[in-house]
């Protein structure tokens, strides 16, 4: 379908039932007449229809359910849609995608997943292009400092839409933009995706520092080193001109490292306070993407050999049983 057609004529299916999917659905319904919404549980769909809001996530956001076609059949959602918006946690991404038998190669695909595809160690965009034959010009990604909870509160937020086809990026930017959601377009698809993964990793470290009560000065030092580490890695994996201080890189890192809405920060804070990694995972009500992203980026970096002392430190805590205080002290010796 041409982007020159009316935006509302391109029917979007939201895939996922969590807080980020709910926030994105709210954005879309400001500019689209109807959407399809895939949730895997029929009981959640029934509760949503009855109450007019997501019964589990961002439950203060009211929806006109008459403008939403709900389905627990992922293939029905794909069939109905011209554009498929992926908004499920990365650890469960393949479990959902394996159910799809409908062709995706002729669809617009938008990834709002801030994680790497487990085991394959590919970004979602790369995975969709390679595995499902999606055209790079039809593959979009969503990034930037934009907590779902603040979207629900109608606070001014910023999204960056990435695509190799800037006109296509502009189309989706219009779909989600509003007086409270400002949009930026970019062609840096890989950079946006890797930054989205790494900011979650570094937010766990920020949370650990908070939990250990090491103070704001120390956190600021870690974050300033983290953004340079992020830049080294992204430039090694996808060399091109980019400004790491742009909101989609540095801005997202800052908000995820400091915000009370950051589940990765909160996960790290529990570890810093003395929770075991296993206990912190069990305590979390939502997925801390950075836990999985740490392992994926570490494995990817085996090919590139980028100097990443902060990544190595958090990996030693999460996967090798290193004491947080020891690992943080060791990484801090590398701070400049």
Image: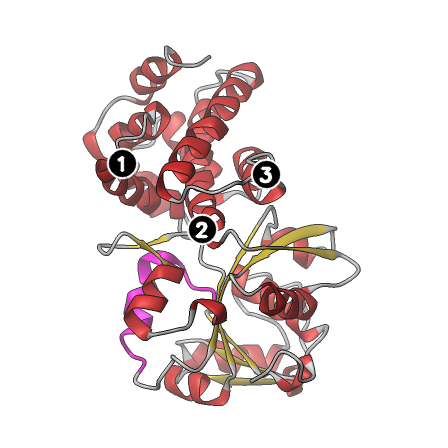
Q: Which residue is identified by label 2?
A: 193
- Inspect the magenta stretch and tell me whether residue 97 lies in it: yes
Q: Secondary structure at mark 3?
A: helix
Q: Residues within 10 Å of mark 2 (few under 14, many from 20)?
A: many
Q: Which residues are magenta?
A: 85-100
Cβ–Cβ below 8 Å for labels 3 and 2?
no
Cβ–Cβ below 8 Å for labels 1 and 3?
no
Q: Which residue is identified by label 3?
A: 255
Q: If you read the primary sequence from the N terminus, does the residue marked by circle 1 or circle 2 appear first? A: 2
Which quarter of the image is occupied by the N terminus?
A: bottom right
Q: CA distance from mark 3 to mark 2?
A: 16 Å
Q: Secondary structure at mark 2?
A: helix
The part of the image, by quadrant, that contains residue 96 is bottom left
Front: mark 1 or 3 = 1
Q: Residue at x 35, y 42 (%)?
A: 237
Residue at the extreme right: 179
- The one nearer the camera, 21 or 306, is 306
Q: Residue at x 31, y 25 (%)?
A: 313
Q: Which residue is identified by label 1?
A: 304
* Up/down of 4 relative to 304, above or below: below
Q: Position of residue 289 (x, y in %)?
A: 39, 48
Q: Position of residue 275 (x, y in %)?
A: 33, 32
């Amino acid at each position: 379908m041409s982007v020159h057609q009316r935006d509302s004529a391109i029917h979007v299916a939201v895939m996922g039932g969590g807080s980020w999917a709910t926030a994105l659905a709210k954005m879309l319904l400001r500019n689209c007449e109807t959407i399809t919404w895939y949730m895997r549980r029929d009981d959640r769909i029934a509760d949503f229809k009855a109450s007019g809001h997501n019964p589990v996530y961002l439950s203060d956001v009211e929806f006109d359910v008459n403008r939403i076609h709900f389905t627990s059949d992922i293939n029905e959602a794909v069939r109905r849609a011209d554009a498929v918006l992926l908004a499920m946690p990365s650890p469960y991404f393949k479990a959902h995608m394996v159910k799809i038998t409908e062709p995706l190669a002729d669809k617009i695909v938008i990834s709002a997943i801030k994680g790497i595809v487990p085991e394959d160690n590919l970004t979602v965009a790369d995975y969709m292009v390679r595995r499902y034959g999606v055209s790079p010009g039809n593959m979009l990604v969503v990034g930037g400092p934009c907590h779902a909870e603040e979207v629900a509160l109608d606070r001014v937020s910023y999204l960056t839409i990435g695509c190799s086809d800037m006109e296509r990026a502009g189309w989706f930017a219009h779909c989600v933009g509003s007086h409270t959601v400002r949009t930026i377009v970019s062609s840096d698809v890989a950079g946006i995706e890797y930054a989205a993964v790494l900011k979650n990793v570094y937010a766990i470290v920020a949370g650990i520092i908070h939990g250990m009560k090491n103070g704001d000065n120390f956190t600021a030092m870690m974050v300033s080193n983290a953004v340079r580490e992020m830049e080294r890695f992204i430039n090694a994996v996808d060399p091109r001109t980019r400004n790491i201080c742009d909101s989609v890189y540095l801005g997202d890192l800052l908000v995820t490292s400091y915000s009370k809405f950051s589940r990765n920060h909160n996960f790290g804070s529990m570890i810093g306070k003395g929770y075991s990694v296993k206990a912190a995972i069990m305590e979390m009500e939502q997925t801390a993407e950075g836990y999985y992203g740490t392992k994926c980026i570490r494995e990817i970096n085996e090919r590139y050999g980028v100097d990443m002392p902060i990544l190595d430190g958090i990996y030693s805590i999460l996967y090798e049983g290193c004491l947080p205080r020891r690992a943080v002290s060791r990484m801090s010796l590398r701070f400049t």
